[in-house]
Each structure stands twice: as structure tokens, then as C-alpha cells.
């Protein structure tokens, strides 16, 4: 074309969670049944919504108003209800004008980063949830700026590292955290959240906290919302019903904005996000209309508690399945719906593989894994050998080799088979490398012992 029409950030739009699906379908075409462990959809993995929630949704679906437009920022009564819930926690106080609904948090994230000035950067965690890292990188046209989550410290960040990066890079205008974290399962204690607030106040930046999994914290770690600690610092929390009802197909999320009138520049930025939403008219009505009735039902807290216990049991089951496996390191999750397995440094090489009887599939795997990250190579060979689809950790804006699975499978026998199959595959994969069986396993065992 006579002009280059490609956005400078187009190459940053990487979402490995779904990109691996394309290759999985190719593997499936060779007769390998796929076990999907990549996408965090509780419903597709067999979770059933309680009948009482279904009945509320069905009743609202019979009302004519659920088929109409709503206010651009969302149904006023629902925003009022949510604002009152925030205010009841203590801390920051907001009104309904501080809440904006989106068609899922993907829509929210796109606007939160897309309507920043291009030179303004947001520092985010690594490993990073791909929607955030890709959107932030795409808006700027450069790689996402990150701070490292430490696997040796329950995947919590080093505050001094965060502060140093912000102090010496004045392009950083915002600080992102995901709490509970995806993909690591970390849950941030109140003291750490206060440090984020202190840093934001010191360097005059805003905070963004993805709280999608706010009601999925377990293993003794209580969830603390940003609203409880943010005080007078500008910022926002992002919430959703996708993983909570769960109703991911509703595509219903919202932002709770704090202290937008304490900074004129931040207020103008928030107005631009609302103006952008206004150009779309509004977000989907039906899920917004049911939120007050579902959240306000006395059965809802029991529903959340049951799910917390369920995911705690599955998280501990996954931890026990991998804790003694030579060559990997795992941390017990404290929240969210995922489990991360980290390969010990230096163990993976470009010669490793897994048994694949189909020679045409084996040739495909060899061709596709010739020049890829070491953990992506493992993920592809795992797919070809077992049909289990995991997400390589390097797909989360991270240079640590590993992979993420979900805690969503409701079929207990299949879930346990999946964990065993992956653990067995790790041992076979490490033994297949150029070091040879004994050396690989010995090195892995010694590395685990040292840590």
C-alpha cells in the first residue's frame, strides 16, 4: 500500500493462552484428543451455575428492559449498589459516577491502556496476564515494562525493585498489580498493598488493580481490596462476574475509580475512557441488571465460600502432584484458578522431546519447535504426546521457563490423570535431552535439594 497502515504496536498483541489453540487443533487433526488446560473458563470445564442464579438471570431475560440500551457507564441502580458495596469495606468512598461498565475486562483493559498518552507507561508484573501486558505494550509500541514476581517468595514482588524502576524512569505514569494474581496464584498482603500506595503517592502516579479473582482467595490468605488501602491516591480496581458467578460468556466487567477528582490530569483521562465507551453507546444490559439481586442474595456468600474451598482443595492437590518432581519448582497458590510450574534454570535444551508414534505428527512437532522458547517447546511436545494443552510461562511476558495449568476440571478422575500425565511427561522430557537420562534427573534432583 502507498502508506504503512500497521499500528506500531501491532507486533505486541500476543495472547499465548489462545494462540496455542491453533496448534492444538492441528494436533487434534492427527487423531489426538485434546485436554484443554489453557483457558480459564470454569463453565467449559464443567462447573454448573447454581439453579437460583440461573432463575434470576432467566427472570430478568423475560423483562423488556434487558433488551434495551442502558446508560453509557452502566445501569444506574447497579452502579449505586456496587458503590455502596465498596463504601461498606471502608477506605475509599465512591459514588455511582465512579463506576464504568465494559463488555468484559478485555474491553476495559483495552481502553485503560489505549487512551493513555503514548509516552505514558504502566509498570506491570512479570509473569503478566497477557491481556494487560499486550495492551500496554501495543499502546506504546514498545515492550511492556515489568517488575519481577519472585518464585522464591510466593511470587510476591520486590518493592525496592519496583521503586527503583519508577524513580529512574519518569515515563512510568501508572503501576499495575493483579490481586489475586494470574498466572501465579499469589495474593498480596495488606502491608504490600500499602507499599504500592506509598510508591504511587511518592512518585505521583496512579494505580490499576485487576481484582477479577477477589472472591477466590484461599489457603489462609485473606483478600484485601485496593479500595481499603488506597487513601487519596488516584487509581482503579477492575472487577468482573466472569470467574465469580461464573458467567464468562456474559462479557461483563467494570472499573471502580478512586480519587479521580484529586488530580485534574487523571480526571481528564477517566473522562476520555468514558467518552470512548459513549461512542459504543453502552455495554450489554442483561448481566448488569442481575448483579444486585445475585450479589445481594443471602445464598451468594455460601456460593463463594463453597468455591473457595473447592479451589483450595484443587490447588493443594496440584501442589502435591508436582512438589517432589525433579527438575521443577512449585509454590502453593493462595488464590485464582491457576497453577504455575517452573522449570529449574538450565535444565531445558533444544533436543528434548516426548514419545509420539505418529511420524507425520512428530515431523510437525520437530518443525514447529525448532526456534521457539524452551518452555514453549515442552508445551508443544506435551500436546503432541498426551493431548494436554498448557500455556508456556514465557507467554506471560516472562523469561522464566515453565507453564500454567488451570484448576477447573470438574471430573476428578480426569483432573488427577492430567496431573499425573504432566508429571510423568516432565520426567521423560528431561531424560530425553542431550545430557542423557541419568545426568538430567541427577542434576534436577540436586537443584531441587539446593532450593
Image: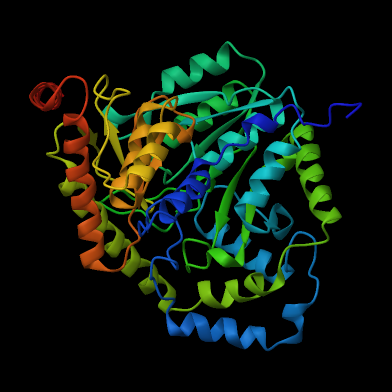
Question: Which sits in the foreground, 362 or 341?
Answer: 362
Above or below, 103 against 111 in this view is: below
From this viewpoint, which residue is outermost toward the right? 2
From this viewpoint, which residue is outermost toward the front? 359
Q: Residue at x 74, y 56 (%)?
A: 97
Residue 198 picture location, percent across and down: 51, 27
Residue 278 picture location, percent across and down: 84, 55
Above or below, 430 against 322 in this view is: above
Answer whether residue 327 is visible to the viewer in this image.
Answer: no
- Which part of the image, by quadrant, shows the N terminus? top right
Answer whether residue 80 is visible to the viewer in this image.
Answer: yes
Residue 76 picture location, percent across and down: 73, 68
Q: Residue at x 41, y 24 (%)?
A: 399
- Which part of the image, by quadrant, shows the C terminus? top left
Question: Which sits in the foreground, 82 or 252?
Answer: 252
Residue 275 picture location, percent across and down: 84, 49
Number of numbered labels in the structure image: 0
Question: Which sits in the foreground, 302 or 367?
Answer: 367
In which quarter of the view is residue 218 placed?
bottom left
Above or below, 39 against 65 in this view is: above
Q: Residue at x 77, y 28 (%)?
A: 117
Which colour scheme appears in the figure? rainbow
Question: Which sits in the foreground, 110 or 348?
Answer: 348
In which quarter of the view is residue 71 placed?
bottom right
Amino acid at each position: 500500500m502507498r502508506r504503512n497502515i500497521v499500528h506500531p504496536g501491532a507486533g505486541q498483541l500476543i495472547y499465548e493462552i489462545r494462540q496455542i489453540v491453533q496448534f492444538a487443533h492441528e494436533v487434534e487433526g492427527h487423531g489426538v484428543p485434546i485436554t484443554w488446560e489453557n483457558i480459564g473458563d470454569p463453565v467449559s470445564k464443567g462447573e454448573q451455575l447454581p439453579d437460583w442464579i440461573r432463575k434470576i438471570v432467566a427472570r430478568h431475560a423475560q423483562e423488556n428492559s434487558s433488551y434495551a440500551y442502558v446508560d453509557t457507564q452502566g445501569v444506574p441502580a447497579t452502579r449505586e449498589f456496587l458503590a455502596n458495596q465498596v463504601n461498606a469495606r471502608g477506605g475509599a468512598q465512591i459514588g455511582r459516577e465512579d463506576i464504568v461498565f465494559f463488555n468484559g475486562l478485555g474491553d476495559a483493559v483495552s481502553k485503560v491502556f489505549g487512551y493513555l498518552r503514548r509516552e505514558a507507561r504502566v509498570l506491570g508484573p512479570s509473569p503478566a496476564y497477557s491481556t494487560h501486558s499486550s495492551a500496554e505494550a501495543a499502546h506504546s509500541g514498545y515492550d511492556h515494562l515489568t517488575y519481577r514476581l519472585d518464585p522464591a517468595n510466593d511470587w510476591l514482588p520486590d518493592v525496592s525493585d519496583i521503586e527503583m524502576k519508577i524513580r529512574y524512569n519518569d515515563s512510568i505514569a501508572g503501576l499495575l498489580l493483579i490481586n489475586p494474581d494470574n498466572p501465579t496464584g499469589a495474593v498480596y498482603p495488606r502491608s504490600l498493598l500499602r507499599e504500592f500506595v506509598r510508591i504511587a503517592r511518592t512518585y505521583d502516579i496512579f494505580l490499576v488493580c485487576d481484582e477479577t479473582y477477589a472472591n477466590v482467595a484461599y489457603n489462609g490468605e485473606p483478600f484485601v481490596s485496593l479500595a481499603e488501602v488506597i487513601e487519596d491516591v488516584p487509581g482503579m480496581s477492575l472487577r468482573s462476574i466472569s470467574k465469580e458467578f461464573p458467567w464468562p460468556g456474559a462479557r461483563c466487567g467494570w472499573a471502580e475509580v478512586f480519587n479521580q477528582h484529586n488530580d485534574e490530569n487523571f480526571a481528564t483521562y477517566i473522562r476520555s475512557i468514558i467518552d470512548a465507551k459513549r461512542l459504543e453507546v453502552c455495554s450489554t444490559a442483561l448481566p448488569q441488571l442481575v448483579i444486585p439481586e445475585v450479589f445481594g442474595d443471602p445464598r451468594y456468600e455460601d456460593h463463594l465460600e463453597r468455591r473457595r474451598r473447592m479451589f483450595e482443595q484443587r490447588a493443594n492437590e496440584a501442589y502435591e502432584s508436582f512438589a517432589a518432581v525433579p527438575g521443577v519448582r512449585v509454590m502453593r497458590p493462595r488464590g485464582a484458578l491457576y497453577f504455575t510450574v517452573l522449570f529449574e534454570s538450565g535444565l531445558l535444551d533444544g533436543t528434548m522431546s516426548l514419545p509420539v508414534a505418529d511420524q507425520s505428527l512428530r515431523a510437525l512437532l520437530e518443525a514447529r519447535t525448532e526456534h521457539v522458547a524452551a518452555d514453549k517447546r515442552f508445551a508443544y511436545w506435551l500436546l503432541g504426546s498426551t493431548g494436554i494443552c498448557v500455556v508456556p510461562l514465557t507467554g506471560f511476558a516472562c523469561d522464566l521457563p515453565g507453564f500454567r495449568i488451570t484448576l477447573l476440571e470438574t471430573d476428578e478422575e480426569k483432573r488427577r490423570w492430567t496431573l499425573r500425565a504432566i508429571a510423568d511427561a516432565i520426567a521423560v522430557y528431561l531424560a530425553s535431552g542431550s545430557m542423557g537420562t541419568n545426568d538430567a534427573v541427577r542434576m534436577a534432583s540436586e537443584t531441587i535439594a539446593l532450593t
